Amino acid sequence: MNIIYLLLAISVIVALVFFAAFIISVKNGQYDDVYTPSVRMLFEDELVDQEKETHQQSTVNKVKSN
């Protein structure tokens, strides 16, 4: 039964070490995303262009039908 207490204590210590490492890495900015915002800006332009083309085509179709 004593081994269970020992293993439980060791597992809590290991969990605390990993939690401290995670906190330190977050504070150092390891998970900051510096690439996606620059790429997202390019994809938004493509979506806007597609919406404009769709809107222009529907406008042209309405004018032709009248």
Image: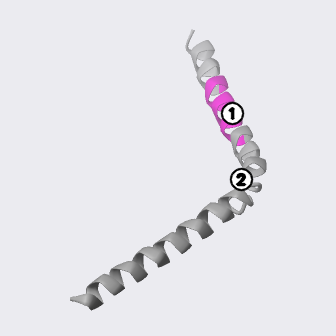
Distance from label 1 to label 2 (Cα)?
18 Å
Q: Residue 32's quadrant in the figure?
A: bottom right
User: Could you say which is closer to the camera, residue 29 or residue 56?
Assistant: 29
Does 35 sit left or right of 14 as displayed? right
Q: Which mark is residue 36?
A: 2
- Amino acid, disc 2: Thr
The residue lying furthest to the front in this view is 2
- For mark 1, give the secondary structure: helix
- Residue at the location (67% across, 24% down)? 56
CA neighbours of label 2 inside 10 A, class few (<14), some (14 to 19), many (20+): few
Furthest-top residue in this view: 66
Secondary structure character of the magenta stretch overall: helix
Which quadrant of the structure image shows residue 35?
Answer: bottom right
* Residue drawn at 71 percent across, 63 percent down: 30
Residue 19 location (% of width, % of height): 54, 66
Helix, strand, or loop for circle 2? helix
Q: Which residues are magenta?
A: 46-56
Q: Nearer the viewer, residue 29 or 45?
A: 29
For image coordinates 47% across by 76% down, the residue present is 13
Q: Quadrant of the N terminus?
A: bottom left
Tell me which numbered mark, 1 or 2, is placed earlier along the sequence: 2
Compared to residue 56, the image places residue 47 above or below, namely below
Q: Is residue 6 above or below residue 46?
A: below
Residue closest to the eye, 49 or 3: 3
Q: Residue at x 62, y 18 (%)?
A: 59
Instruction: Write down the residue under mark 1.
Output: 48
The reply, left or right, for residue 1 in relation to residue 43 is: left
54 magenta-colored:
yes
Give the quarter of the image for residue 21: bottom right
Q: Nearer the viewer, residue 12 or 41?
A: 12
